[in-house]
Amino acid sequence: MENISNRALISRLYSSAIEKLEDADYDAQQWSEWYLAVQELSGAEKMVFVIVKMNQTVTNGGFAEFYEKSFGIFAPEVIYVLNEIKATASAEIVSSSLPVVNPEGLLDDDYKKEVFNIQLSVTQKTQLQSQDILYDSLQDVENLEDLLGDYLQSKFQ
C-alpha cells in the first residue's frame, strides 16, 4: 500500500469528490438534488468533502457563511464525521450553532429545506460569532487535518 501523507490523501479525496460533483447531473438550486449528489460520493470522499467545506467556509466567513452558502444542510453529517474522527470539541461547536439557525428543531428533510437558502438575521449572525470565536480557538488544539487523515488512513487504506 502506498505511503501517503494525510494532506495528500485528503487533497486526493477532495479533488475526486469535486470532480464527481462537477460531472454529476443535478440542479444545484434544488437542495434535494445537491444533497443526493453528495450522498453518491464514496464514504471517504463524502467525509472529506463535508469537513473541508465546513472548515473552508467557517475559516473564511464564519458559521454565518457556512449556513448562508447552503453548506448548513450538511451540518448533521459534519457533526457525525467530527465525532467519528474524535474531533469532539469541533463537533460540539457545530452542534451549538444548530439552535441558532434551526430554533424550531426541525429534522431531516424539513431541516435541510429550511436552511438551504437561509438568510440569517443580524441577531442570528451575532449569535453565531461566539461559535466562530470558539472554532478559531481550536486551531492549535484539535487539528482536523491530522484527525481526519489519521482516521482515513486507518479505515480506508
Image (cartoon, rainbow, N blue to C red):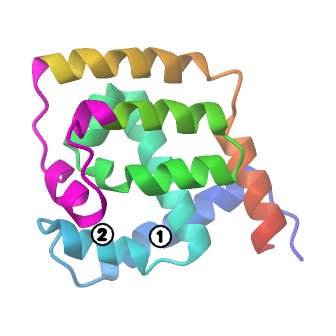
* In the rendered image, the vertical position of residue 126 relative to residue 99, given as above or below: above
How many neighbours does mark 2 have within 10 angstroms: few (below 14), some (14-19), or many (20 or more)?
some
Instruction: Give how far across and how far down residue 133 sits, in percent.
Output: 45, 14
Instruction: Give how far across and how far down residue 138 sits, in percent.
Output: 61, 22
Q: Which mark is residue 77?
A: none
Per the image, the residue denoted by label 1 is: 17
Q: Is residue 8 left or right of residue 157?
A: left
Q: Determine the secondary structure under disc 2.
A: helix
* In the rendered image, the vertical position of residue 135 relative to residue 69, given as above or below: above
* In the rendered image, the vertical position of residue 127 relative to residue 91, given as above or below: above
Q: Quarter-wise, where is residue 113 in the image?
A: bottom left
CA gap between label 1 and label 2 equals: 13 Å
- Numbered label tally: 2
Q: Residue at x 11, y 65 (%)?
A: 29
Q: Residue at x 21, y 72 (%)?
A: 32
**Where's the N terminus, which quadrant?**
bottom right
Per the image, the residue denoted by label 2 is: 35
Q: Residue at x 47, y 77 (%)?
A: 41
- Of 66 and 89, the residue lying toward us: 89
Instruction: Give how far across and how far down residue 127 sits, in percent.
Output: 28, 17
Q: Quarter-wise, where is residue 111 in the image?
A: bottom left
Q: Let me know if residue 138 appears in the view.
A: yes
Residue 101 among those drawn in magenta: yes
Badge 2 amino acid:
Tyr
Q: Determine the secondary structure under disc 1.
A: helix
Residue 34 among those drawn in magenta: no
Instruction: Give how far across and how far down residue 30 sits, in percent.
Output: 13, 69
Badge 1 amino acid:
Ala
- Magenta range is 99-122
